[in-house]
Structure formats: structure tokens, C-alpha cells
Amino acid sequence: MGDRIVVGMSGGVDSSVAAALLVEQGYDVVGVTLRVWPWKESSDPARKFGSCCSPETVDDARQVARKLGIPHYLLNSEREFDSTVIANFTREYLAGRTPVPCVVCNQKVKFGSLLQRALAWEATAVATGHYARLETDPVTGRILLRKARDLKKDQTDFLWPLTQEQLRQARFPVGGLTKDDVRSKARLLGLSVADKPESQEICFIPDNDYRGFLRRRDPEGFRPGHIVDRNGKMLGAHEGISAYTIGQRRGLGLSSGEPLYVVALEPESNRVVVGRKEELEATALTATAVNFIPFDQLDGELRVYAKIRHNHVPARATLRPSGEGRVALVFEEPQRAITPGQSVVFYQDDLVVGGGIIAS
């Protein structure tokens, strides 16, 4: 039998097929499902609490593991997930930023603590169902991260913070397949999750009500304050800056004669700033916590395509170093709703050059 690989099994079709492919390739596969949030049993079997935290989801992963003939373990990661992913999620919203929890989870949990545990189990890698591809640079020996074959499903924008050590011990078995290929493979193998719908929600937030979650988690982010325009003129009242994000139009409760959008959040003064649609456009940003993949640091200007949110079409831009762990990015064309707290990811063709957290 080949090397041991631990597969993070969410109960979905992607991670299930990832495990199946590794079994076919002769690896010693161990399935692990992380319990990252406490669940409550529901009297309604159709109701699920989160996409990766319900008893139904764990049972799906367990059934797949049984079908594949591999061991499966449920690991309680609630405390760690709370102190890393959820704490960061809450802290960022309180600071007027809009975070991406999946990025933190991949960096700190799946390819952080789970990887360390896998290595302690004498495994050589952790595999997930992410749509992404890895290869080794023949000149430098560095591990390169490339977009998935199925560009509609590509998830490299959630993986940009991974270090060379983490990438070297990561596996993405479905990265070379399309979503249709994955479902077909699951049907061929008789996996119960073959036609399971995809979840679009944040895994630890029931009903996708992030405002309700934040209100319960930290009421401080819901202190009433003023909605103002760029000149500071008061236009209305808000229910707390944690309830708003850049580009938001609905739910402002304003009776202006023209559509207004959230253009800035000011946690220090507890103000929500609104403006016209064109005020959302900008040509530059700065990013912090930057990580580069083909090289360690940026020594000069670099032409890239930059992506500022998951569904954003990457746009032409120039990248420049701007101090330790920081970069400045200038777009050729204005981009709408550049949002602090979100990831900005840099590409050259299908190569992930790196990424960072939008600061301003």
C-alpha cells in the first residue's frame, strides 16, 4: 500500500470523490470530518444546521468511507475553530471589514492543525475536495498553485495564503476534473452523495443569517449610529456597522431620490458612509498579509490579473511592493466595490502569483 493521506471529508461530492480517487491510486486513505460547530438535533430531517456541522453531513461522509473501505474519524475542532476562524470573522466585522472565513479555515485549520495531526499519524499529506491544481516548478523546485480545469468551480482564491510547506503536503485530487466529471465518477462508484446539492452558506451560520450570528456573538458591533454622505451630512440612522458591507444598497432605509450605496465604513466614529454608484469605483488598493507562491517576495513591479472577490472577473493591474508584507495594486480600469477584509488574489494566466487581504 502507498503513502498514507488524510482526506478532509465534508460529506459533499467533491471531497468524497477526492477520497475515492486516492483509493484508486493505491494510497492508504484515512477519512476525517471536522466538527467545527456544535449542532442541535432537529425534528425536521430535511433541516440542516450549517453545511459541514450537521449529523446528516457526518453520516454522509461516514457512508462514503464505508463504501470506499477506508477508516473514518470525526474530530472535534470546535474550540480551535472558534478561536481562529470565528474570532477573526467577528473581529473583522467589528472593524468595518468584510472577511472571507474559508481563507482562514484553509490556512489555520485544514492545512494547519489537521495537517499537523495527519503528520503525527504518519501521513504524508492532507487532501481536500478543492478545485485547484498543484505542480512543481522544474527550475526552482517550488510548488506552484494553478487554477482548476473547471474555471467555473476554481477555488484557488481561497488557497492563496498556503505556504510552500503546506502546499508540498497538500493534495487536490479533483482539480483536473470538471464538476460534471466529479458527479459522474460518484455515480459510477455508487456513492450516495453523487447528486447532493452544493451548499452556498457559511458553514457555521445557520440559515446564512450572518447579521443574526454576529449580533448574538458580539452585540458591540450593533450600536446604532449615523448614515452620512461623503461630506458628513447625516441622512439617516443605522443599526450597527457590522450589518453593512461596501457596495450594499438594500436595507439602508433612506428616502433619497437616487440610489445610494455603502461606500465606506468608519468604526471609529460608528458611521456608515453612502454615495452614488460611481463613488464605489476605484483604481487602486493596498493589501496586507501578502503571500507569494512562485517566489518569496516581490522585488519590483509585476503585471498581473487581480481578483477582488470570489465572483469577480480578474482585471489587469500592476503590483508594486509597499513595505513589509504589503503591496500596492493599480488597476488599468476602475473596479467596483473594492472591499477591505476581502482577499485580493494575483494571477498570471492560470498561475496563482499570490494574494493578500485588502486594507484600503
Image (cartoon, helix red, strand yellow):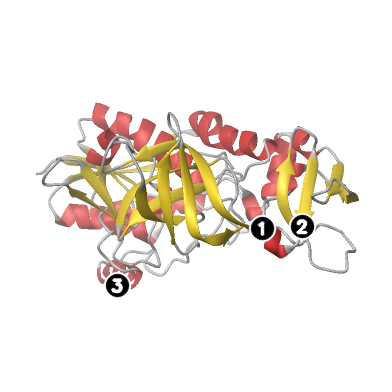
Q: Quadrant of residue 28?
A: top left
The residue lying toward the viewer, choosing from 165 and 275, is 275
The numbered mark, 2 or 1, whose residue comes first in the sequence reads 2
Q: What residue lies at 59% left-to-right and 32% top-to-bottom? A: 87
Q: Name the residue under label 1.
A: 280
Q: Which of marks 3 and 1 is in front?
A: 1
Labels 2 and 3: the sequence-earlier one: 3
Callout 2: few (<14), some (14-19), or many (20+) C-alpha neighbours within 10 Å? many
Which residue corresponds to mark 2? 275
Relative to 119, is 298 on the left or the right?
right
In the displayed structure, 84 sits above or below 187; it is above
Q: Position of residue 61 (x, y in %)?
A: 38, 52
* Residue 67 in the image, given as x and y percentages of width and height: 28, 57
Q: Which amino acid does label 1 sit on?
A: Leu
From mark 2 to mark 1, how far is it between C-alphas?
8 Å
Q: Note whether residue 95 is visible.
A: yes
Q: Is residue 47 left or right of residue 144?
A: right
User: Relative to 253, is 118 on the left or the right?
Assistant: left
User: Upstream in the sequence, badge 3 or badge 1?
Assistant: 3
Amino acid under disc 2: Gly
Name the disc covering residue 184, or none: 3
Q: Are marks 2 and 1 in contact (CB under 8 Å)?
A: yes
Q: Pointer 1: residues within 10 angstroms few (<14), some, or many (20+)?
A: many
